[in-house]
Image (tube, grey):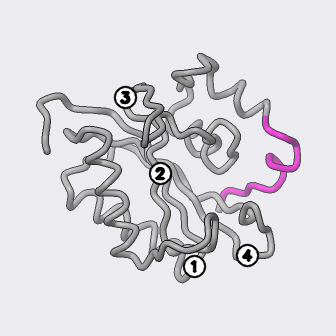
Amino acid sequence: MLENQVNTVYLGIGSNLGNRISNIEKAKYYLMQNNIKIISVSRYYETPSWPNPKNPKFINIVLKAKCYYKPFDLFNICKFIEKKLGRKRTVKNSPRECDIDIIDFKGQVLKKQLFLPHKLMHKRSFVLFPLFEIEREWVHPIQNVNIKKLILSLPNNDIRSIKQI
């Protein structure tokens, strides 16, 4: 369902199976095919898989987009795209071709069924670094902390283990 108001959203896209960059680019294409207008995109970032670093490394990006969808409609589009790109629902945090998370939806706070902002985003280097790249003044809607402070609060090994590619 479309609503009248345009919404600014931040999406995280990651992949650690198959051609990771191609999977991310296809996800971006399918988002655009669903009337999601991409405004800016971070560079690619590679990190060890979490919680099991023995799994293949992830490549992640964050993008800023505009859409007319409500949060749940956008969530359902993201899940549809993940499935289209080969994601199968298995064990939590298992390797996958595509993972699309809503990081922030217009600064809204939701705590039922869908959590906004993404409930672990403030602890994840692979979200914070690319988000900082495209939105240096972003502030966490619940914690009211700017992104620079969130990055500085990450453990040193998380900061050391991320690399821009």
Depth check: 150 or 110 in front? 110
Disc assigned to residue 101: 2
Assign a secondary structure to mark 4.
Answer: loop
Pointer 3 residue: 106
Assign a secondary structure to mark 1.
Answer: loop
User: Going 29% across and 57% down the picture, which residue do you hit?
Assistant: 77
Q: Earlier in the sequence, mark 4 or mark 1?
A: 1
Residue 159 image point, x, y percent = 80, 46
Distance between mark 1 and mark 2 Cα atoms: 17 Å
In-image side of 81 versus 111 (left or right): left
Q: Earlier in the sequence, mark 4 or mark 3?
A: 4
Distance between mark 4 and mark 1 Cα atoms: 9 Å
Residue 29 image point, x, y percent = 30, 65
Distance between mark 2 and mark 3 Cα atoms: 14 Å
Pointer 4 residue: 55
Q: Amino acid at mark 2?
A: Asp
Direction bottom: furthest residue: 18
Q: Amino acid at mark 1?
A: Leu
Disc assigned to residue 65: none
